[in-house]
Amino acid sequence: MLAVTAHQGTITVVEKDIPSGAGELIRVTSSGICGSDLHMIEAGLSGVILGHEFGGTTSDGRLVAIRPTGECGTCTACMTGRSQTCASAGRSLHGMSRDGGLAEFVLADPNQLFEIPVGVEPASVALVEPLAVVFHGINRTQIQRGSRAVIIGAGSIGLLTAAALVDRGVEVDIVTRHPHQSMAAEALGARPLSEPGSDYDVSFDAVCSQKSFDACVTATRPCGTLLEFGMFWSPVTLNNALMMKEITVVPSIFYGHTHEHHDFEEAIDLLARTPLLIDVVVSHKLALADAAEAFRIANDRSSGAIKVHLFTHL
Ligand SMILES: [Zn+2]
Ligand SMILES: [Zn+2]
């Protein structure tokens, strides 16, 4: 089978054996390239098959999205509805610690599969994972209908956040840098701006740099909330504006579930109700064999890229 790996920063498509062993063999439909893939490759990630945003079909023909984190299911975090902080969640992540979905086949644990309802566009399956990331962050803020939110950064996470917040009846401003991002924001019902306004109830940092963090602090109202998506790839310092306004900084990693709620299921529900999302957010579709070109496009925002998807059959 074809599979995509990195070696010293270079993307290569290689021929590998179809995986075998315990687990469910998934025939991959599509996979997304994530900003964190780009950061990890730059940091030296090598050898493993890339890709943590993917879905496909099971041997009995069910279309599924795959939660790429491996949770142990038995530790205190897993038993108390905080599985995203389980030590095994990141340690066994598809596309980083074990082979991922940028391949024709991948072996996944049956408890990591989420069935996609009939009628949902099969190509949208690779959007479930980043959308689950988004819902996890939004749910951690406990933002209410009628609130005002600002999103700094209009890549795929920023735009998916805009769509999910608009769906919840939140008034959404989003800071964009490129015309294609502004058009996407408008299509999703958010207001694109080049500079944020002020006194937002909640700010969402979808860039995770010093500049974006500071912009969120400035834009958030006193006693408001600042949601930090994902990883800081270089250290960020705090300032006294954060103190003087008593802003609550909320970190958000992966996705979680309780007995009543699962971030993955919420993501699938929004995709099922909003077919427009895939048209707006997936800017590029390439064949798996063209992975090197796909990563080049994903790395270059001026190319018009929002989310780049790779398909095993295009
Ligand atoms: Zn990702
Ligand atoms: Zn655990």
Image (cartoon, helix red, strand yellow):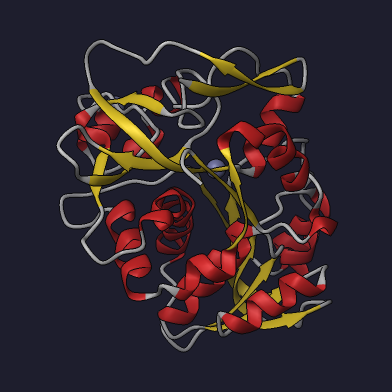
Residue at the image point whose x is 72% and y is 61% from the top: 242
Q: Is residue 304 visible?
A: yes
Query: Quadrant of the image for the N terminus?
Result: top left
The total of numbered circles placed on residues is 0
Is residue 247 visible in the rendered image? The answer is no
Left or right: 282 as drawn, with respect to 218: left
Q: Measured from the top left, where is residue 53 in percent x and y?
A: 48, 42
Picture residue at 49% right of the left edge, 81% below the top = 166
Q: Is residue 135 above or below residue 219?
A: above
Q: Residue furthest bottom?
A: 146
Horizontal placement of 58 versus 266: left or right?
left
Could you say where residue 151 lies in the image, as x and y percent from the top left? 65, 69
Residue 251 place in picture, x, y as percent: 54, 49
Relative to the observer, which residue lies in front, 184 or 29?
29
Residue placed most toward the observer, 311 or 224: 311
User: Foreground: 229 or 224?
Assistant: 229
Quadrant of the displayed image that contains ligand 2: top left
Quarter location, residue 116: bottom left
Picture quadrant where residue 250 is located = bottom right
Q: x and y percent of residue 18 in the render?
A: 37, 15
What residue is shown at x 73% (from left), y 77% (from top)? Answer: 182
218 horizontally vs 159: left or right: right
Q: Is residue 166 above or below residue 176?
A: below
Quarter holding residue 168: bottom left
Q: Residue at x 77, y 58 (%)?
A: 212
Looking at the image, which is closer to me, 205 or 188?
Answer: 188
